[in-house]
Image (cartoon, grey):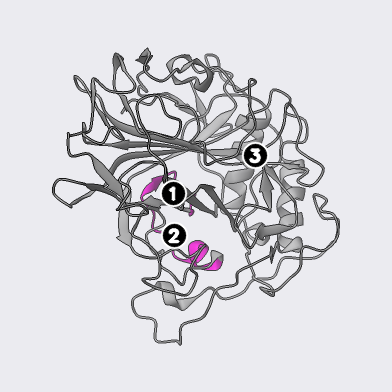
Amino acid sequence: MSYISFPEPEASPAPPRPDLPARGARSKRGVIAGAAAAVIVVGAAAVYLGGTGSEPETSKAANAIPYTSASAAPGESPSAPPTASASAATVAPSASATPQAAAAPKIPPTGWLPVDRAAWKAQVDAYNALKIDPVPAGVGNLPEFRADCQYSHRRPDDPIVFPGLPGASHMHSFVGNKAVDADTVAGDLMKFTATSCKPVQDHSAYWVPTLYDNGTGKPVETTGFRVYYRSLMKNPAGQMPMPNGLRMISGDAKKKQPTPRGARGQFYCAFYGPGDLDGIARSTNGNWPICGGDATLHYMMQFPDCWDGKHLDSPNHKDHVSYGSGEACPRSHPVKIPAITFDIQYGVKGTPAGYYLSSDKEGKSASSMHGDAFVVWDAATMNKRTKNCVFQRRTCDNYGYQK
């Protein structure tokens, strides 16, 4: 699978980030719509993870993800990390994520969802105490690690936007945790950990609106779904790991605008070697590229890299996180977290009939493309990846240092 970066969709209100790390043909700043570009090959990489090379053992207290009152208010100005000293408590996860469940359905919390301060403090303490693993020769300096995922399942559910309401959403295509439905809460992701992602310590769920072939009406599922966790800043000071249970949305499902050649937020063409990102032709309505040679459709979207330090979600699923500016996070969102990037591949080349997203069947453009991330990792693995790869500014793959 080849990957190339493309400017973020206009729906993701990130300020200009001229400091984004260079990536050769994957560099966002080096891509201009319609221009020929070289796409690098992601080859087999030698893997190294300090010590014996084995995965870190599953952590305990820092993995606990209890939920508190859904009506919690934003409160005073956020700060991070919390200083309260307490042991993390565990709460039994929802049984509704299993087919055998007989319990009455619950309504997962919404609104300003407070972080469990004891669990976050335990994770932060473990992160601060963690030593950086020795770096073998040949490791690059891109501050990132990743999870490579495959398509898991399709449902008209959205446990972030429409929690507890099965069938209330447009159709979504899910990757990662295989147990996700409308009733899923963070504890479920930690309990039911079967995943379509590597490494298996990533229990997160990621999803996007389902893509359909406009000529046949049949769904077109992803053939590759890479999730990067990386730094958008040059200064690693203050870099923290992701808190378990963080929920985020990138893009705007309600946006209905054309996506002609050269537009921001469009699908693009990519494969090994040079090619035209905008395609050699366009669909009849002009909104979708038709790829030449062996290139296929791709899409990339960027999530925020700063967090308020207090809430795992907010009423609009965006206000608890923010994009940094320059080399710093805003005072309102002082916690520097890895920035998630979806790099998505579809195994189709484009057709004159074009496509449509489940979020905009009538408009048949790409402008409503959006993504959801419900982040839950084994905390020890998240801490190790963030410390070794993002904080230390070393290139890592799914399992550790990438040579």
The relative height of residue 226 versus residue 104 in the rendered view (above or below) is above
Residue 188 image point, x, y percent? 49, 67
Please tell me which residue is depicted at 48% across the width and 65% down the height of the picture: 159
C-beta proximity under 8 Å, tags 2 and 3: no
Neighbour tally class for label 1: few under 14, some 14-19, many 20 plus, Cα within 10 Å: some
Please tell me which residue is depicted at 63% across the width and 27% down the height of the picture: 16
Pair 1/3: label in front: 3
Q: Is residue 98 left or right of residue 242?
A: left
Determine the image quadrant of residue 336. Answer: top right
Q: Is residue 216 left or right of residue 166?
A: left
Determine the image quadrant of residue 117. Answer: bottom right
Three-letter residue code for mark 2? Thr
At mark 2, the secondary structure is loop
Residue 94 image point, x, y percent? 50, 75
The relative height of residue 198 versus residue 191 in the rendered view (above or below) is above
Between residue 337 and residue 315, name the one nearer to us: 315
Q: State the mark number for residue 200.
A: 1
At mark 1, the secondary structure is loop
Of marks 2 and 1, which one's residue comes earlier in the chain? 2
Q: CA distance from mark 2 to mark 3?
A: 25 Å
The residue under label 2 is 193
C-beta proximity under 8 Å, tags 2 and 1: yes
Magenta-tinted stretch? 187-204
At mark 3, the secondary structure is loop
Q: Is residue 36 left or right of residue 69?
A: left
The answer, for residue 207, to whether it is visible in the render is: yes
